[in-house]
Image (tube, rainbow, N blue to C red):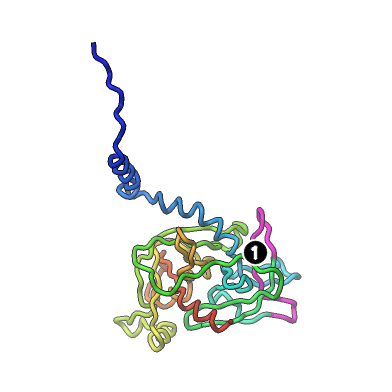
Amino acid sequence: MTIASSPQPVPDRGRRRLLAQALALPVALGLPALVHADLVTTVPRIKPSVVAVGTYQRTRSPAFQFRGTGFVVGDGQLVATNAHVLPERIDSDKMEALVIVVPGEGQTGSVRQVTVGASDRSRDLAVLKLGGGPPLPALRLARAGGVQEGQTVAFTGFPIGNVLGMTPVTHRGIVAAITPIGIPQANARDLNPALIRRLANDVFRVYQLDATAYPGNSGSPLYDPASGEVIGVLNMVFVKSTKESVLSDPSGISYAIPVEYLHRLLGEVR
């Protein structure tokens, strides 16, 4: 007669080894489980700070015209976005105003009027100032530097404007490369005015991402999925016009302006 032996307790060292193997399994299989876990807790903290930027005129239809994404920074009275998101002019005679829309429950949102506090056209950044009212929840900006190629990132914004409703959408990816914004071309015919300006001025570096973004994502915060700290500002027009000037069809590559340049611009506002 065979008597089944009862399971023996696993020594502490064995338990630690089994735990380490379990935690390493998603990585070994190429599954971004930890990234998903980070985003589940981080996205709800990011979304209340992400706003739609555009113009508002009560007498037109639709009254709100979407131009890009922005996110709240500083004391809750400032909004960061891309400079190209701002309109060339505001028709104040027809009661047009520069505004942000703060998404609410469902498909609703509240409109808040803003003014331009500072703008850096050379790096396509702008800071807007709220025209009164309660402050909004602000995102924390990371310190300059520290971003590495291969680093996991996420961004939240309005990829197709308000066509699908005023609900911020989150994408994730990695920093595929840290690359100069202006690259000399082999043929002089490939030099467009934007590229000539970039090469003549300060050729700074931008983050090239492997995640797909859309023009409505311009101005979205690029952040660390674990901490929620902003490391850059999504850019879907300014950078592409320089780096991809010789392409007949636009690529699916996305870019972001490093947060260090936003720090400098905020210094001007304050």
In the image, taking residue 133 as reference, residue 224 lies left or right, namely left
Above or below, 120 relative to 103 = below
Q: Position of residue 17 (x, y in %)?
A: 29, 43
Q: Amino acid at mark 1?
A: Val
Which residue is the extreme one toward the left?
1
Q: Which quarter of the picture shows residue 184?
A: bottom left
Residue appearing at x 52%, y 56% in the figure: 43
Question: At numbered mark 1, what does the secondary structure look like: helix, strand or loop?
Answer: strand
Q: As rendered, which of 221 and 196 lies closer to the eye?
A: 221
102 falls in the magenta region: yes
Describe residue 25's horizontal placement relative to residue 78 as left or right: left
Q: Residue 87: percent from the left, percent from the top?
A: 61, 78
User: On the image, numbered disc 1 is attached to which residue?
Assistant: 102
Classify the position of the C terminus by image quarter. bottom right
**Given the current orientation, which residue lies at the most extreme bottom position?**
200
Write down the quadrant of residue 185 in the picture: bottom left
Percent position of residue 63, x then y: 71, 67
Rendering coords of residue 241 (x, y %): 44, 76
Q: Which residues are magenta?
A: 91-110
> Is residue 210 shown left or right of residue 90?
left
- Viewer-proximal residue, 191 or 36? 36
Q: Quadrant of residue 266?
A: bottom right
Q: Is residue 116 magenta?
A: no
> Which residue is rendered at x = 75% and y = 81% of the image?
93
Report the residue at 55% width, 78% height from top. Answer: 126
Task: Please give the name of the residue rendered at 56% of the width and 62% of the height, measured from the top-left corner.
Answer: 158
Q: Could you tell me which quadrant the N terminus lies in?
A: top left
Q: Residues within 10 Å of mark 1 (few under 14, many from 20)?
A: many
